């Protein structure tokens, strides 16, 4: 049967209203099933979001099954709506960190058609406030990476996205030589966790809450924290 080797077989195409989302938002899409020259049974239609954690490692961060046990008639087009919420811990697209949608058909005794669509995951308002405040203090981003967490982690997250900084020219933070930060999403805002080293080699760790509506106040709070080494907010 030619469809078993992909000749005249069904194809799948995912149509997105947009390709940029923020953690917690819902992806709204339409999945088109384009039949081939013969009737084909579809055991499952799977829709998922994947994020790259390292050059050779990626994770499925959200998924759903659209339908099971369908028959796609020859030379027809079937369209199914799909909605899938991004988790609050979805990593922000930056540098090597990227995400994509994967749509796959499960067809017995045939090649399984797939469709891959890149998406950009943008910061929430509180996440953007953190990035803006650090840049406003003269810190330059030197890298971003994903740190996998053990399943029993107290943070209740599968991984943390780590942002690394160093003072740029004219930075306001003479007491900071290197800084790394990550966040844990909360119901409204986030918990910001920072590790930094002073020029004398001392290491400091602080965590603070960043409410959703606290963006304008964050820069002076961080300046005070990183210059006094005391949590006085």
Image (spheres, rainbow, N blue to C red):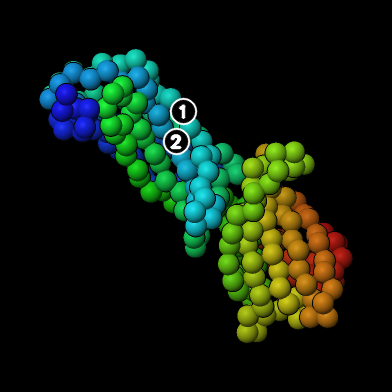
Front in this rendered view, residue 185 or 160: 160
Q: Earlier in the sequence, mark 1 or mark 2?
A: 2
The residue located at (18%, 18%) in the rendering is 39
Q: Quadrant of the C terminus?
A: bottom right
Image spot of residue 24 (x, y percent)? 55, 40
In the displayed orientation, state which residue is furthest to the bottom.
169
Q: CA distance from mark 1 to mark 2?
A: 6 Å
Task: Give residue 227's quadrant in the image.
Answer: bottom right
The residue located at (76%, 68%) in the rendering is 196
- Residue named by callout 2: 48
Image spot of residue 81 (x, y percent)? 35, 27
Q: Quadrant of the N terminus?
A: top left
Image spot of residue 224 (x, y percent)? 79, 69
The residue located at (76%, 63%) in the rendering is 195
Task: Give residue 199's quadrant in the image.
Answer: bottom right
The residue located at (73%, 77%) in the rendering is 177
Q: Is residue 222 visible?
A: yes
How packed mark 2 is, by other alpha carbons closer than 10 Å (few <14, some 14-19, many 20 or more), is some
The answer to whether residue 146 is above or below residue 176 is above
How packed mark 1 is, by other alpha carbons closer than 10 Å (few <14, some 14-19, many 20 or more), is some
CB within 8 Å, label 1 to label 2: yes
The answer to whether residue 104 is left or right of residue 78 is right
- Residue named by callout 1: 64
């Amino acid at each position: 049967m030619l469809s078993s080797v992909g000749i005249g077989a069904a194809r799948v195409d995912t149509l997105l209203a947009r390709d940029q989302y923020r953690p917690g938002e819902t992806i709204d899409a339409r999945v088109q099933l384009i039949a081939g020259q013969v009737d084909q049974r579809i055991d499952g239609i799977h829709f998922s979001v994947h994020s790259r954690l390292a050059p050779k490692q990626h994770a499925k961060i959200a998924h759903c099954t659209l339908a099971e046990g369908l028959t796609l008639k020859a030379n027809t087009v079937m369209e199914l709506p799909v909605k899938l919420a991004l988790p609050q811990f979805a990593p922000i697209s930056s540098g090597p960190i990227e995400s994509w949608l994967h749509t796959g058909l499960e067809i017995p005794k045939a090649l399984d058609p797939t469709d891959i669509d890149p998406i950009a995951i943008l910061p929430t308002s509180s996440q953007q406030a953190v990035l803006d405040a650090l840049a406003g203090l003269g810190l330059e981003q030197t890298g971003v990476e994903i740190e996998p967490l053990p399943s029993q982690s107290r943070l209740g997250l599968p991984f943390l996205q780590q942002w690394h900084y160093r003072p740029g020219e004219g930075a306001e933070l003479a007491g900071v030589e290197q800084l790394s930060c990550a966040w844990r999403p909360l119901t409204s805002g986030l918990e910001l966790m920072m590790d930094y080293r002073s020029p004398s080699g001392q290491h400091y760790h602080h965590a603070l809450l960043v409410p959703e509506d606290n963006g304008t106040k964050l820069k002076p709070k961080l300046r005070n924290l990183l210059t006094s080494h005391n949590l006085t907010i």
